[in-house]
């Protein structure tokens, strides 16, 4: 695996609580699922990788450059795509203006922007709503507009924080197909509570608990960790439950 994102000894604290603690992670091209219970630290990790939050300790290298220096930071921001769990927008912007605005923030060459914006909007199935104002979109459509801004610059590293929340089943299937396509040459990290997303779209899966990485492997390996006696309605849910149970038992 060629490593494009490398995290070493990462710690992020809020007051006395460590949201991330001594976290190591390597990611290469492909779709990586990020699972974990509420409060595990998934969003915090995404925010660090998206350069929104500075670590309190540890190193992050993105596409070969450390985020701790100004040159690395600027180059990373141009080659990143980030869909936060919730995002702000000007309600009177149209979908096209919203996506254009992000293309501009990511310092894309002006001549490339119109085509790239239309392509991104088309890839999320919103072309027929491109001239609608953001305030007139449904929740699922807003999320799709959010996905369009994340992919507009053809990023090498894509970070999606719960992208499938609010999407209808058909849109979820289409989004998973888009994930698989994006993962052919980019690093795609997707946090989700929907374990079916992982089975359907991910080449690797990481599981976090209490700020630490407790599993990192193939979806089939997480499935194999579960047994008939574990709680869960699907093989991967049973694997998820088994890994958490074993980790917590070992920590006692
Ligand atoms: N701005 C903040 N101020 C204080 N504590 C925070 C803040 N953001 C996150 N935390 C804490 O950090 C820990 C990790 O939170 P984080 O949002 O990263 O978890 P998560 O895995 O994304 O959870 P969820 O599945 O609920 O989205 C939690 O204990 C949370 O309470």
Image: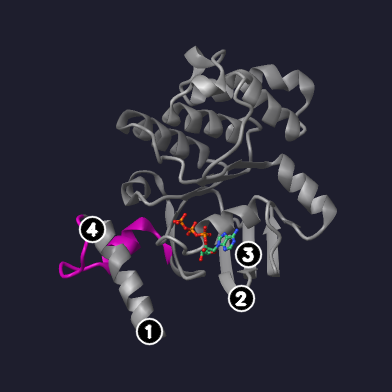
- Return the residue found at the far bottom: 252
Rendering coords of residue 130 (x, y %): 55, 16
| Circle number at residue 250 | 1
Q: CA distance from mark 2 to mark 1?
A: 23 Å
Q: Which secondary structure, mark 2?
A: loop
For the record, the magenta segment spans 216-233
Rendering coords of residue 134 (x, y %): 55, 23
Which residue is painted at 38% across and 77% down in the image? 247
* Label located before the other in sequence (4 or 2): 2
Rendering coords of residue 204 (x, y %): 43, 55
Q: CA distance from mark 2 to mark 3?
A: 22 Å
Quickly name the residue at label 2.
16
Q: CA distance from mark 4 to mark 3?
A: 30 Å
Q: Which secondary structure, mark 4?
A: helix
Q: Is residue 218 magenta?
A: yes
Q: Which secondary structure, mark 3?
A: strand
* Label located before the other in sequence (2 or 3): 3
Ligand 1 closer than 8 Å to the CB at disc 2? no
Quickly name the residue at label 4.
235
Ligand 1 closer than 8 Å to the CB at disc 3? no
Q: CA distance from mark 1 to mark 4?
A: 23 Å
Q: Is residue 88 above or below residue 58?
A: above
| Circle number at residue 7 | 3
Label 1, residues with CA under 10 Å away: few <14, some 14-19, many ≥20: few
- Quadrant in the rendering for residue 107: top right
Mark in front: 1 vs 4: 1
Which residue is painted at 58% across and 21% down in the image? 95
Which residue is painted at 61% across and 57% down in the image? 3
């Amino acid at each position: 695996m060629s490593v494009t994102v490398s995290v070493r000894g990462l710690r992020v604290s809020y007051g006395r609580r460590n949201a991330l603690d001594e976290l190591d992670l390597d990611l290469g091209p492909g779709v990586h699922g990020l699972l974990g219970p509420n409060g595990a630290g998934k969003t915090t990790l995404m925010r660090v990788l998206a350069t929104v939050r500075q670590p309190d300790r540890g190193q992050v290298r993105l596409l070969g450059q450390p985020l701790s220096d100004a040159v690395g930071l600027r180059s990373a921001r141009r080659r990143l795509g980030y869909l936060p769990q919730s995002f702000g927008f000007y309600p009177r912007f149209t979908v096209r203006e919203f996506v254009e605005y992000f293309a501009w923030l990511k310092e894309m060459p002006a001549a490339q922007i119109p085509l790239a914006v239309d392509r991104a909007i088309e890839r999320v199935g919103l072309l027929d709503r491109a001239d609608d104002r953001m305030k007139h979109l449904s929740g699922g459509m807003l999320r799709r507009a959010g996905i369009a801004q994340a992919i507009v610059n053809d990023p090498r590293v894509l970070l999606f924080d719960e992208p499938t929340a609010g999407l209808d089943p058909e849109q979820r299937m289409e989004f998973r197909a888009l994930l698989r396509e994006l993962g052919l040459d980019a690093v795609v990290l997707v946090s989700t509570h929907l374990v079916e997303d992982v089975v359907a779209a991910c080449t690797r899966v990481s599981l976090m608990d209490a700020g630490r990485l407790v599993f990192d492997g193939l979806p089939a390996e997480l499935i194999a960790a579960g047994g008939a006696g574990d709680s869960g309605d699907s093989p991967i849910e049973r694997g998820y439950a088994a890994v958490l149970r074993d980790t917590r038992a070992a920590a006692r």
